[in-house]
Amino acid sequence: MVQQKCQVDEVTVSVVWNKLMNITREVGERVVHGAQSYVMANARDLGPVLLDKNGHIVCQVEYLPCHCLVAEIPTRAILKKFGKLEKGDMVLGNDGHILQSGHLPDWTFLVPVYYGDELVFYYHFRGHMADSGGAFSGSYFPQAYDCISEGINIPPIKLIEKGKIDEKAREIIFDNIRTSAAVWSDCMVIYGSIQRAQEDIRALIDKYGLDTVKACCDEMMVRGEQAMRAEISQIPEGEYTGECAVDSDGTVMDRPAWVRVKLTVKGDEMTFDFSDSMDQVDFVNSPLGNTYCFTYFPIFYATDPDLPHNHGALIPIKIIAPAGKIVNPTRPATYGACGCSTATEITDAVTQALSKATEKAQGVSSRHYSIDVTGRVPIKDPRSGQDIEYFAAPFLEEGGSGAVKGHDGWDGVCGTVLTGVVLRGSVEVCELLMPFYWEWLNMAKDMEGPGEFIGARGCTASRWCTAMEGARTILMAGDASGTFFPPAGAGGAPYAPTGDLYLKRAGKKEKEFFPTMSMAPMYAGDILYTECMGAGGWGNPLDRDPEKIRLDVRDELITAERARNVYGVVIDPKSLTDNPEDVAIDYKATRELREKLKKDPRTRHPDLVRDDVRAGKISVQEARDKYAVVIKEDDGRRVIDYKATEKLRPH
């Protein structure tokens, strides 16, 4: 543990720290307002991070964790290749097997920050670009058999060296992507924004002195480590496990891709071991940095929100992820879905383990369930003379955050990997950009994650295709999962519901099941129906305040049947009139029912039933008949069939 006495007064530490945070925040804001990429400009799908000259995170701010918490690993790879970067350099890369960062659409930029002739900081920036080559814009297409077919793999390269653009490198890269003018513009916006940040940092150093600024950063590192160690030391020592699966790997559609973790807490340190995870498969593999990021993510959820999210806070956390596993793939494995789907399952598995260790753990947020779209419109762009090409992630059909002890989850702040940082999409902007219109977009009834404190509610939507003749419109469900594996609750809460996707083709009456990790063409009149699940709750649903249930029944967010079966709250049937304000609780019947349900074996947590089956304490048949938990074989072990269990249990 690092211990040192700060040589700077508290006020100066606070002022310098917050100024660096704000300078970093402004790096992102300038890109948001100047980007051509739909997802950077309209959804804030980006993240700037300030690191010290050794590549350690100094500060990060309110942008996507997948772009921020990952920063040290790609920075390490870049500095290993080039050594210390020089003034005016900008390194660009997206190769997940070298940078070990994430999927190809998320480009990494590293720029040094000098004060005079002294290297002081680095800015790491990662953002989702409009295109990265490959078979289709967006790169969310499964069944690519290697990473080369997913898109252009850019090793770390000095796109700008000492302030001068490498035109040969630029030509090679940008001749191999679509919408190259827009992507180049975004690269320059990022570089320019960081240049402005350098000026602000130099002004800060001019005011306080280089030694003072360094001392303030060192102090915040120490505080980060001390605070994290204090949080961990409150957790009982022991081993805790969690597991979750992506619906499929996009190639073998009925084969889930399992992430498993064992958390070991010892003293003021914790270790997360993913060795029992599945071997690498297709499409959903998670490069090491992505795995680190989404292991850190639920830890910060379960600790003091004022804890500095810097290198110091990461020191007491150890991660084991053997090469060749789904959580650390080797070349030429594909990894297109890692940022949206497998990231969620890593977060879920870690959250399950943390939930067994601490009451501070949060229920898992809804899965990312808003399907991306890519295509080409037969309208000539007057600037290029080419048909208009586009990729867009709507971020509309999303749920929200999981519950914590004392608080319900937040509705409508998007899924696990988005954390309320990505802006929920604008229907109007989406309809301007994409050949779709949304007939409805509503909160889903009976789709919240149950608990004493409920997870955010799900969402239901109807998306109609309005593509013109000759257009190519392709749905990409490679960023979605959760049809078969629902978000976990915390504090003993059961699982949230699962989701469902359906297509209805023009002229047909019947809807057809649309699997995640797949693609499908869309034509005028086709409809995508989305039933996004809610988020994980916290605590026993039978302990929820009955008045909160009454209000949800009044507001038609929960049916009287679900109020009774899941929460043990009996709504007086005579109160269900045309006036919702008449809804009333039968308190006597509620007390009696809750006592009865607490003794009902069907309310036992499914994980406990599964563990008893694995230990040989009960049979698979008893799990089904007595506890209403359906157990099946998968990947060499007994696992829960969540879809079947959901139908069998009171809901």
Image: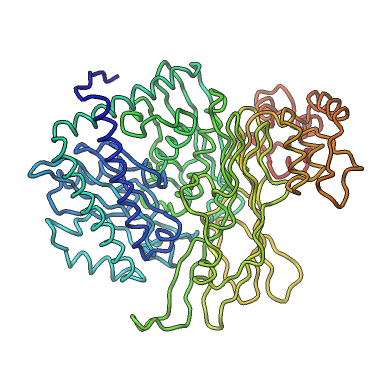
Dividing the picture into quadrants, the one containing residue 13 is top left
Q: Is residue 601 above or below residue 438?
A: above
Tell me the quarter of the image containing the N terminus. top left
- Position of residue 27 in the picture relative to residue 213 (left or right): right
Q: Residue at x 62, y 34 (%)?
A: 489
> How far from the left and from the top, in percent, is residue 357?
54, 23
Q: Residue at x 29, y 29 (%)?
A: 220
Camera-side residue: 96 or 633? 96
Q: Residue at x 78, y 31 (%)?
A: 602
Camera-side residue: 552 or 519? 552
> How far from the left and from the top, in percent, is residue 392?
47, 64
Q: How is the image coloured?
A: rainbow
- Position of residue 281 in the picture relative to residue 524 (left or right): left
Q: Is residue 467 above or below residue 89?
A: below
Q: Residue furthest left?
A: 117
Tell me the quarter of the image containing the C terminus. top right
Camera-side residue: 95 or 651? 651
- Position of residue 170 in the picture relative to residue 639 (left or right): left
> How far from the left and from the top, in percent, is residue 248?
56, 50
- For the image, the number of numbered tags is 0
Camera-side residue: 7 or 481? 7
